[in-house]
Amino acid sequence: MRFQTPLLPATLIRRYKRFLADCQLPDGREITAHCANPGSMMGLADPGSTVWLEPNDDPKKKLKYGLRLVEVAGGTLVGVDTSVPNRALKSALEARQIAALSAYETVRAEVKYAEKSRIDFLLSQPGLPDCYFEVKSVTLSRQPGLAEFPDSVTARGAKHLGNLADMCRSGHRAVLLYLVQRGDCERFQIAGDIDPTYAAAWDAAAAAGVERLVIATRITPEGVAIAGAIGAGAG
C-alpha cells in the first residue's frame, strides 16, 4: 500500500486527545495533524521524535496533515495509522498473497456478523467454511525484537475475540491477524500485564479454535508492504 501523497518529515511537539498531534515542520511552522490511532502509542509519542506526515488538500478535512509514521531508535519506522493494515491486507488477500488464506477467492470487507459488530473481512470459497478474519495493528515493543499487543486496555478487542470464538463454535473458521507495523521485531506475544482481560479472552478464543497469524511489514516513507510471518511466543 502506497501513501497517496509524499510524506513530510516533522518533529513531534505533543500528542493529545488521542487523535491530535502538534508538530513542527522543517520550515519552523507548527501545525496540528490528525492521529488515526486510538491506542496509547506507548513509546511512540515522545516530544522531539521525528514523525512523518501525509499532507492533503481535501476541503472536507479540517486538518491538512495526517500522522503516518514515527521514527524510533536506529531509524526504524513505525506505522501508527490504524487504518493502514486493512487497506494493505485487502490487496494482499485479493491477490492470495497470505499462504494460510490463499484458498479463499471472495473477499468482503466490513461485514455485519454479530450484535453491533462488523468483521474486518469475510472470506468465502465453495467447499470451504466461511472465514471470519479480524486485523489488529501492532506497534508496541518494550524489549528488543519483541512486538506486543495491546498497548492499552481494549475492551473492544476482547469483544472481538469473543465474537470470533462464537464463529468457531458455529462451525466457521476464524482468524485474528496481528500486523506488526515496525521492522525491528521478529517475535510476538500478548501483553498480558497491560490488559489481563484481553489475554484471558485470547486464551479462551484459542481454545475455541480461533487461529492466530502474525505478519511483518516493510515500512518506508513511500508505503507499507506486507512481508512474511514472524514467530509468536506464549500468550
Image (cartoon, rainbow, N blue to C red):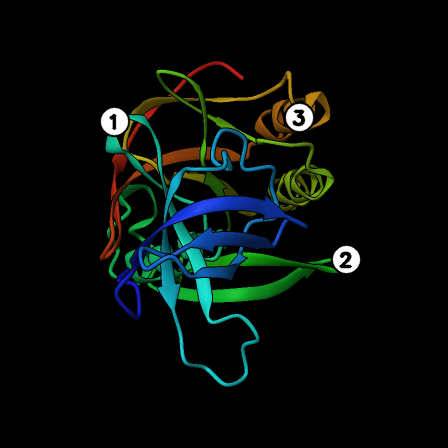
Q: CA distance from mark 2 to mark 3?
A: 19 Å
Crowd band around label 3 with a 10 angstrom C-alpha radius: few (<14), some (14–19), many (20+): some
Mark 1 or 3, nearer chain start: 1
Classify 187 as above or below 94.
Answer: above
Mark 2 or 3, nearer chain start: 2
Classify 1 as above or below 11.
Answer: below
Q: CA distance from mark 2 to mark 1?
A: 44 Å
- The quarter of the picture where the C terminus appears is top right
Q: Amino acid at mark 3?
A: Ala
The residue identified by callout 3 is: 204
Q: CA distance from mark 1 to mark 3?
A: 37 Å
The residue identified by callout 2 is: 115
Which residue is at a point 55% across and 49% down the rendered structure image? 37
- Pick the front one: 233 or 33: 33
**Quarter-of-image position of residue 200:** top right
Which residue is at a point 32% across and 41% down the rendered structure image? 100
What kind of element bears circle 3?
A: helix
Residue 74 numbered tag: 1
